[in-house]
Image (cartoon, rainbow, N blue to C red):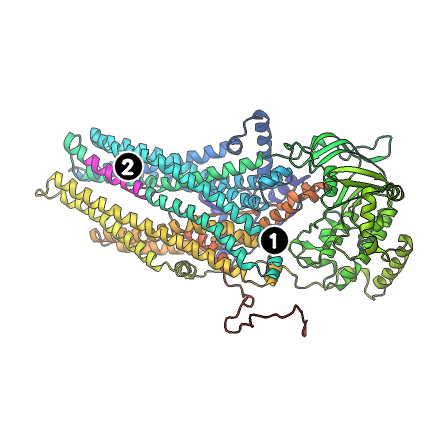
Amino acid sequence: MEPIICKNNRELPRSGLTNKLHEKTSQQEEPSFFSKLFFYWVNPLLAKGYKKPLVLEDIPSLELVDQAAVAHEKFTKEWDLLRAEQALNNANMVLKTLVKVYFHEMVLSGVCVFLRTIAVVASPLLLYAFVGYTNREIKDLHQGFFLVGYLTAVKVTESLSHRQFYFIARRTGMRMRSALMMKVYEKQLKLSHLGKKRHSAGEVVNYIAVDAYRMVEFPMWFHVGWSSFIQLCLAIGVLFFIVGLGAFPGLVPLIICGLLNVPYAKAIKKCQLEFMVAQDKRLRSTSEILNNMKVLKLQSWEQKFKEIIESCRELEFRWLSEAQFKKVYGTILYWLSPTLVSSAILIGCLFLGSAPLDSATIFTILATLRTMSDPVRFLPEAISALIQVNVSFDRINSFLVDDELKDDLLKRDQEREKSDDSIRIKHGNFAWDPESSIPTLRDVSVEVKCGQKVAVCGSVGAGKSTMLNAILGEISKTSGTVDVFGSIAYVSQTSWIQSGTIQDNILYGKPMVRNKYERAIKACALDKDIEAFEHGDLTEIGQRGINMSGGQKQRIQLARAVYNDADIYLLDDPFSAVDAHTATSLFNDCVMTCLKDKTVILVTHQVEFLSYVDNILVLQDGQVTQTGNYDDLLMAGTTFEQLVNAHKDANTNLYTSPYENKSKLHNTENKSWLSKKNSKENILTKGLGAQLTEEEEKETGNVGWKTFLDYVVISEGSWFFSSSVMSHVGFVALQATASYWLAFGIQLPAITTVMLICVYTFVSTTSMLFVSLRSLFATLLGLKASKAFFHKFTDSVFAAPMVFFDSTPVGRILTRVSSDLSVIDFDIPFSFAFAVSAGIDLLATIGIMASVTWQVIIVAIFAIAASKYVQGYYQPTARELMRINGTTKAPLMNYASETSLGVATIRAFKMQDRSFFKLNPNHNCFSPALHPKRLHLSSLANYIISIERIKQFMHIPPEQPTTVENIRPPSSWPSKGEIQFEDLK
């Protein structure tokens, strides 16, 4: 069974999280043993999905053991123990931790797959017994019933153990994925500056969207790998039991094929590693471009940056092509081995005379070799999947063991000593790169008293922002001491705004206290802005505050700091994005009045405010060159005097007495704030309606064969598709011919044994040519589809108007160009080929059986009808769950990307726990899907959802073209620079 994941957005505080989850899940009745064995427990969801398209609210919650919080807690506990044991050796830490946490579950799924393997290998022995029974002249009825009962038991055991293995393995993989996703996100909140240089925001998103998602497949492919080897060995044992020493020649081609697999696996691993590096580069560039699309649009740079993305994709595509073509080689290798093995065994029987080449022996050999077909088919996939997982393990491991901020280097939130210091730095040396011989800040000694207003000034690049980062602990301290007494609120130079409402951004996890909230809004001059917004403070802010001006974003994050009610305020040039009048208002009403009892360190270039602060720090070239009040520094001359003189002329008439001006502004604002007839509640929460960011669209219901056809049509690969189908038809026909030749040839005395074996070998080997062509054409179709979907998607997104980017979170685009595109690159091509092949194999099997016993057609009709009904009952639920899973990945990616941009702010406010549990990955419902190996069409139908999602962004209404060829202005245009507005609304 395959777990399909979806999201239930709930935010729970870290404290008591597990208890609250337990309260919720404990209300659900525990399924009985037989319900678990036969999966009856999922019937209510399947029935609901059959009656109507499922929505998120229809999905039940997971059991407690499947919750991400529990998975992360278990992983973190073992990870910390392992880190302590292996302080110097950090290799394979992720894999070792997962093995420790999920060892028992892996053993359980291993037992299930082992039972299934035994049942599969027992089938040829049953066939041998049945043939021997039918050849007897006197038949024992009791023995016949015993064989039928034994066959039934074996098949039931095979079916149940296989489904349980698949379900348990995928469930374990889901837990691994949830644990790693949350661990990667948690690590992002602890990463040092050096770590962030090595792992960009785009790469972190890729770790979550691609690498962690591969863990779902890991337990299944791990067990498929070793069980396939066991199945091959047991099948060889059966051959020795049937034909004796004649099986020895069959070992030669088997060993040769196994040895040839070693360079194949190494080549695939290299391609996969290089592909992931290229993919990281593309996603990093894509993330940066999408986050700055407004600048690109204003400068008409879309084409240039689109070419950058396409060049990154070209490198990525080169490694993808090489990996996929090597898989064709693997397919040839593994399909060729059964043919060579069977021919070698028949030759061995002929020359060694170890067994008679009668119908019982020949068909038992063929049946045994058929049990080797599944391992032969899935070993290349298992090796490829495990190589991909291994690469992902290495990438996640390198991230999780990377450099973190050292909490012990900074003492924060200490109890205030007898002195009234708020901040104390003694002989501090700080460097962004700890290995650098020249520190960024040198010999810093600063004491800030409680309630003081301290300004930090200096020229550009002097180290002002670095000084605040030193207090926050964001920069490595190479020597000295830093002591901070009290909580910190931080306003960064580049405003960091979260997706959500204005109110959400100001409260930032704190409970609403209306009077305190209104004071913060007034102090930060946001009242008029909120009145102007249609939805008041419930106006939704687009991603990164895209629908807010720079000044509005800066004032919102300033209001967030004010509402936080911290002891110490670190304000990094908060007036840079506002006009002089608003800056004066903010300084008076916020810094000097609202925060009058707080310790404030203000980085600013507005020297007109410096005369009203208690102390001034002047920085130059990473050193505090001067300290003192305004008058003392002005008389001392040098650096500070130059700074003041540089701003003097521009600010002569700008600033009056702060207290006089404050009174005027306060009265004026009170009038405008209270002159409205609206109540305070109405002002803050005016009408609710459509907001900026709309809910992500998704298809509903059965779209039929349209998406399958789109895959072929959009890729312009109809010729490759047709050739792949015809190649498989040729393969099936030749395989059937080979079997027929053995069946009838052995009955004809005119045909010698040597001729029988030679013709069989020739026909079977020729069939390998067709299966090779099938894989080659499927690969070419997949590569054309990857290229076509990427280019059409990229062209559509870059041609989209700015309103699209205003209303579409970047996460929605990134999930499509990461995980969804990865499905098109790797999963769909061979799944598409296997689905078509399974259909052809089914028709061929029915045709062959009907040619011998026509009554099979009647049974086949009923079997196909029953299978169609089961598929029709199951598929609507699976399809909608996959769609819900797709739409709920985007907020997760968006939130991870957003967090990476505001890590310093999150850490300053000590909101890591809130941010961590707000992540709440999309894992809060769980439903089984039928095994894709048996139902290839179901697997493909689930993968095809990725095509639906990418297609949604391939037809975005474009903006007007950059150039209109038939209407070109003269080459001298424009003669002068001028902007005109006509009827602008």
Q: Is residue 803 placed above or below 658 in the rendered structure?
A: below
User: Total label count?
Assistant: 2
The verdict on residue 778 being magenta is: no
Residue at image mark 2:
146
Q: Position of residue 894 (x, y in %)?
A: 60, 50
Question: Label 1: how many residues lie within 10 Å, few (<14), some (14-19) or many (20+)?
Answer: some
| Image: magenta residue range | 330-346
Mark 1–mark 2 distance (CA, rounded to whole Å)? 70 Å
Q: Which mark is residue 291?
A: 1
Secondary structure beneath dot 2 equals helix
Q: Is residue 310 placed above or below 349 in the rendered structure?
A: below
Answer with left or right where residue 427 lies relative to residue 216: right
Residue 455 sits in which quadrant?
top right
Q: Is residue 165 visible?
A: no
Residue 267 sits in which quadrant?
top left
Q: Which mark is residue 733?
A: none
Most common secondary structure along the magenta stretch: helix
Of badges 1 and 2, nearer the viewer stands: 1
| Quadrant where the image shows the C terminus | bottom right
Q: Position of residue 848 (x, y in %)?
A: 23, 51
Answer with left or right where residue 744 lies relative to residue 578: left
Toward the viewer: 368 or 737? Answer: 737
The verdict on residue 343 being magenta is: yes
User: Residue type at mark 1?
Assistant: Asn
Q: Hey, which residue is sitting farthest left in the picture?
A: 750
Q: Is residue 27 visible?
A: yes
